[in-house]
Amino acid sequence: MIVTPFFLTALLAFAQTAGKRLVIFPGRSAVFSSYNDFDRRRQGNSEIIACEREGRGITLRYLLREGFIRPFAGVRIDPGSILDLSDYDALIVRIDPGSASAVRIAMLSPLDGYTKADDYDTYLLMQNEISAGRKRKEYLIPFDRMTIPSLWHEEQLSAYDPRVVRNFSRIRYIDFSTGISQVLNVENEIVIESITAVCTFRSALLRFSPIMLLYLPLLIILIVRGNFRTGKSCVRIVATTRAGTAVSEISDSEEGLVIEYIGENFSDRMLTVRMVSQKTGISRYRIPEIIKEKYNMSFPQYINTIRLAEAKRLLSESDRKISEISAKVGFASVNHFNRLFRAQQNCSPAFFRKNNKG
């Protein structure tokens, strides 16, 4: 069935929010530095052997030694400016922990009137420790699992407002350091390959649930009045033109015919501009112009965007194999599907399903 314009507009906003991501590293003018327990306050004996940018990412080589109560070494990444991550709810990081069994990931946020630029202990600290299992892979770190450590409370809250809470709207640094249980006197390394802030499917669903509930009574009324017409099920993306008119509001025009036909047939892996032209009677030269004007995409990009949106729905709502989902939404090759999915989501379909399965 074809859903009404206002509901599809909300659905499009939901899809855009669910897929929202911000690549923090690489891709930004990030700088980095190393740190360890070898300082005046902690008086540890650990050693930074090297901290450098190499082929895979930032490599920290270190040697932990007895001295401080919890020997540690880490790398601090400065993205170049304060990041507002309030529209996101998780980090996806790809790291190689070497022989470390755990890695601690922290975000530092400046506190007005208290933080000193060169004193990192005065920044609000929010952290989470992951069990890396000595495996190079992607890890999802939800923001709701990042906590302010009790040690920070004990050392800083006497000098700052005790009501301080987590704040992801002003992130100045992101830290990667060794976890609690580490092997001493053995050279090791951590490689940080990528950091991406994401809005997960589950978070977007929670944000848009009230909007969907508001639309529900109106949808029921429209169904009763017969404003929905039956037909082949489809996925349609509704855009707004520069003049402010929704595409679905001009469904009888050539633009509406093109969008509707593609929405009903996107899963056909043989779908081409020529086929759309033959079925709608619209010039095959005009069709790419319509897509470009409405969505600022090429014809293939638009088709793949719809296919990936449907794939994400199937990944989160069904138990179908990834190869089956790839074929069902119209991809001729599962390798091509995996490549496009990773480019859009910065994670594999399997990783997406694991963290968004309802």
Image: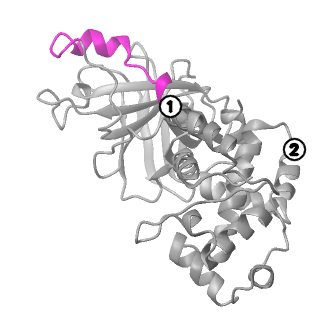
Q: For mark 1, give the secondary structure.
A: helix
Write down the quadrant of residue 189 in the picture. top right
The residue identified by callout 1 is: 210
Of residues 235 and 124, the one drawn nearer to the viewer in this rendering: 235
Q: Position of residue 89 (x, y in %)?
A: 48, 35
User: What mark, if any, has residue 321 been given in the picture?
Assistant: 2
Q: In front: mark 2 or mark 1?
A: 1
Label 2 neighbour load within 10 Å: few <14, some 14-19, many 20+: few
What residue appears at the point 68 percent right and 40 percent down from the top-left corner? Answer: 224
Of residues 126 and 19, the one drawn nearer to the viewer in this rendering: 19
Would you say 317 lies left or right of 79 here? right
Q: What stretch is highlighted in magenta?
A: 142-162
Is 153 part of what is drawn in magenta?
yes
Please identify the quadrant where the C terminus is shown. Answer: top right
Q: For mark 2, give the secondary structure.
A: loop
What residue appears at the point 18 percent right and 15 percent down from the top-left corner? Answer: 161
What residue appears at the point 68 percent right and 73 percent down from the top-left corner? Answer: 257
Residue 310 visible in the shown view? yes
Check disc 2 and give the amino acid type.
Lys
Check disc 1 and give the amino acid type.
Pro
Would you say 20 lies left or right of 358 here? left
Would you say 14 lies left or right of 135 here? left
Image position of 176 with respect to 127: above or below: below
